[in-house]
Image: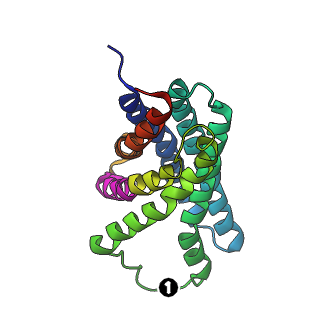
């Protein structure tokens, strides 16, 4: 028996985020040692631009392809190319906004300054901040998709709230997962752990906004 729309949507988001977001983080991990020694405006902006580009090409494209394959069966008139492009645009906007704090901090950090390393904020700060980041970037991720979705379903604006709720949970799941990745164990252990964390986050996100999308599209197509 074939799985229903909701179940297939969850799985699609799980594997797409695992490969897309996971590969973005893995490539960033590999490039980090080469970029950490660089200083100045140019390298900092290059690092931010590279992260945004990877987010668009890897996460945005893969998630768009996976989602379009499932959604297209529920909405036959949906243009898969438009949905994929919208997902890439949303990913680019979200990654761009998400990179602002770290980029500004890197630009303002005194070059060559010596002193104690910065103290990492505790979990009481990190996880609520991750929830707020998810609530803010979720609608941005779904904004361009909404412009496509509204042509096919009524009350498509609910998709923005669904993405806010989904990423309010998904973002702290990523932060929590990254805290338990065995970073000192070498790439052979780190890489699978990163993919697993991103896959779990994708499943969680898909479960939340997929429920809303299932209801929205049922209103148009029926069960």
Task: Residue at the far top: name it.
Answer: 1
What colour scheme governs how the chains and residues are painted in the rendered image of this protein? rainbow
Coordinates of residue 97 in the picture (x, y in percent): 58, 65
Look at mark 1 in the image and give the residue it sits on. Answer: 114
Q: Is residue 174 magenta?
A: yes
Name the residue rendered at 35%, 59% in the picture: 172
- Front residue of 5 and 215: 215
Q: Say which quarter of the image contains residue 11.
A: top left
Magenta stretch, main secondary structure, is helix
- Front residue of 114 and 101: 101
Coordinates of residue 122 in the picture (x, y in percent): 29, 74
Q: Is residue 126 magenta?
A: no
Name the residue rendered at 54%, 70% in the picture: 102
On screen, residue 38 above or below 194: below
Location of the N terminus by quadrant is: top left
The mark tally for this picture is 1
Name the residue rendered at 37%, 24% in the picture: 4
Q: Secondary structure at mark 1?
A: loop
Q: Is residue 53 visible?
A: yes
Coordinates of residue 141 in the picture (x, y in percent): 55, 53
Location of the C terminus by quadrant is: top left
Q: Is residue 196 visible?
A: no
Q: Which residues are magenta?
A: 168-184
Coordinates of residue 221 in the picture (x, y in percent): 49, 28
Crowding at label 1, few (<14), some or many (≥20) Cα neighbours within 10 Å?
few
Name the residue rendered at 56%, 81% in the picture: 109
């Amino acid at each position: 028996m074939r799985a229903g729309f909701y179940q297939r949507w969850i799985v699609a988001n799980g594997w797409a985020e695992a490969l897309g977001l996971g590969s973005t983080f893995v490539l960033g991990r590999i490039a980090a040692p080469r970029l950490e020694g660089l200083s100045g405006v140019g390298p900092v902006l290059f690092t931010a631009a590279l992260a945004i580009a990877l987010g668009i090409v890897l996460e945005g494209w893969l998630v768009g392809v996976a989602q379009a394959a499932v959604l297209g069966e529920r909405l036959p008139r949906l243009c898969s190319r438009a949905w994929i492009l919208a997902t890439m645009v949303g990913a680019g906007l979200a990654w761009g906004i998400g990179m602002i704090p770290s980029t500004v901090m890197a630009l303002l950090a005194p070059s060559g300054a010596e002193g104690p390393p910065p103290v990492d904020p505790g979990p009481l700060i990190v996880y609520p901040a991750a929830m707020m980041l998810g609530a803010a970037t979720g609608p941005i991720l779904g904004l361009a998709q909404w412009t496509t979705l509204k042509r096919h379903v009524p009350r498509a604006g609910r998709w923005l709230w669904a993405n806010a709720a989904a990423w309010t949970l998904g973002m702290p799941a990523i932060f929590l997962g990254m805290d338990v990745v065995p970073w000192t164990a070498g790439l052979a252990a780190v890489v699978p752990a990163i993919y697993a964390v991103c896959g779990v986050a994708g499943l969680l996100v898909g479960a939340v906004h997929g429920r809303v999308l299932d209801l929205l599209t049922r209103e148009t197509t029926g069960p």
